[in-house]
């Protein structure tokens, strides 16, 4: 509430309707004579609403009835906003304007999942994807043994590893990580999509958690797409393109736009080509996992979330853990 500095005197006249049964309150008309009105606001926050509605304030100097009505309206609106708000100011403190952009930022931060939710979702999703890939590989193997015209995924793409595969893995990591970095600096739509995905997944995680969200999806996704679907569709360039397109489309959503799907398609082509060259699922698995880790680390040290944002995230996590 504001301050009222008065230098003068008041006259008070009791209304003739003070004893009315419909209005049990005593209504009084006050007049301010020869005074200085320094400031008055927040009256509705102190006096009862019925009393304030019947109070007539008639300043004869430096104030008008019209300005007081406007002042009274502002007080009513301020009282309503304070009532609807989830948090209240301490008594004696001035109300502060809230920037709409800050509210949007707080809503975005509150919508960020907690660390336990991210790790749980990553583990469950990766487990389901890996199980689906294993089932396809086993079914294709049994169908091939029975003489059906289906390629044996297990024989086409194995878990074998040779030393020259390490060079292929290193080349894929350098190619994909450098291309991602250049696109983040030059393609705004892709940068926004990547930022939205990283904020939702990586914001609440610790440094060691990055290993989990980098390697689990890398292993499971490559087991399904390059270890099962790629040989099932023919194990050639057409199969590489088809599986890469499916891989890209499935990366839409959660703030990621078509630019991110196009990027995922390009990455799928690179991993598919490496799989055809090596006939080993270890190559795309390792490349995918390391690229995920590099991208997460770069985002962590470039984003530098503010201290206030981290406090809000920690507060939200504490609330969720206490439920």
Image: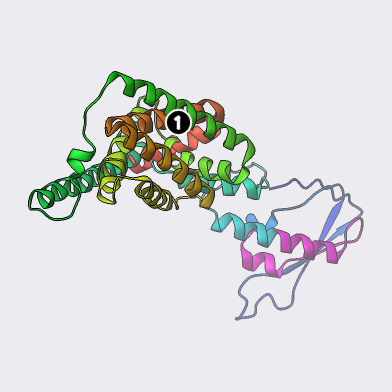
The residue at the point 34 percent across, 33 percent down is 277
Which quadrant is home to the C terminus? top left
The residue at the point 57 percent across, 41 percent down is 191
Q: Is residue 87 above or below residue 68?
A: above
**Residue in the foreground of this view, choosing between 68 and 321:** 321
Quick check: is 63 in the magenta stretch? yes
Q: Which residue is mark 1?
A: 296
Residue 212 in view (yes/no): no
Crowd rating for badge 1 (residues with CA inside 10 Å; few <14, some 14–19, many 20+): many
Q: Position of residue 82 (x, y in %)?
A: 59, 54
Q: Position of residue 87 (x, y in %)?
A: 52, 48
Q: Is residue 272 above or below residue 167?
A: below
**Count the marks: how many?**
1
**Residue in the foreground of this view, choosing between 177 and 236:** 236
Q: Which residues are magenta?
A: 46-74
In this view, the residue farthest toward the bottom is 21
Q: Is residue 44 left or right of residue 320?
A: right
Q: Is residue 237 left or right of residue 28?
A: left
Q: Is residue 22 above or below residue 270?
A: below
**Residue in the foreground of this view, choosing between 146 and 114:** 146
Quick check: is 306 in the magenta stretch? no
């Amino acid at each position: 509430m504001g301050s009222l500095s008065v230098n003068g005197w008041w006259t008070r006249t009791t209304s003739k309707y003070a004893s009315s049964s419909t209005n049990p309150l005593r209504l009084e008309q006050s007049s301010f004579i020869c005074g200085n009105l320094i400031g008055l606001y927040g009256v509705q926050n102190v006096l009862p609403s019925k009393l304030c509605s019947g109070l007539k304030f008639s300043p004869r100097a430096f104030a008008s009835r019209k300005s007081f009505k406007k002042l009274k309206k502002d007080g009513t609106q301020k009282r309503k906003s304070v009532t609807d708000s989830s948090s209240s100011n301490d008594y004696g403190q001035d109300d502060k304007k809230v920037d709409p952009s800050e509210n949007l930022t707080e809503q975005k931060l509150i919508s960020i999942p907690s660390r336990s939710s991210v790790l749980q979702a990553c583990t469950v999703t990766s487990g389901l994807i890996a199980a689906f890939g294993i089932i396809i590989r086993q079914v294709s193997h049994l169908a091939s043994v029975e003489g059906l015209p289906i390629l044996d995924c297990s024989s086409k793409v194995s878990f074998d590893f040779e030393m020259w595969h390490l060079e292929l893995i290193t080349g894929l990591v350098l190619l994909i990580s450098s291309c991602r970095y250049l696109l983040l600096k030059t393609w705004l739509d892709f940068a926004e999509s990547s930022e939205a995905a990283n904020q939702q997944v990586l914001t609440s995680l610790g440094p060691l958690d990055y290993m989990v969200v980098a390697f689990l999806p890398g292993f499971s996704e490559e087991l399904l797409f390059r270890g099962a679907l790629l040989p099932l569709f023919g194990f050639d360039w057409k199969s590489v393109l088809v599986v890469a397109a499916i891989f890209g489309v499935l990366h839409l959503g959660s703030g990621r736009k078509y630019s991110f799907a196009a990027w995922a398609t390009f990455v799928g082509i690179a991993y598919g080509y490496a799989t055809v060259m090596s006939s080993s699922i270890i190559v795309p698995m390792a490349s995918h996992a390391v690229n995920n880790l590099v991208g997460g680390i770069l985002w962590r040290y470039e984003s530098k979330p503010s201290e206030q944002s981290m406090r809000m995230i920690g507060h939200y996590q504490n609330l969720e853990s206490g439920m």
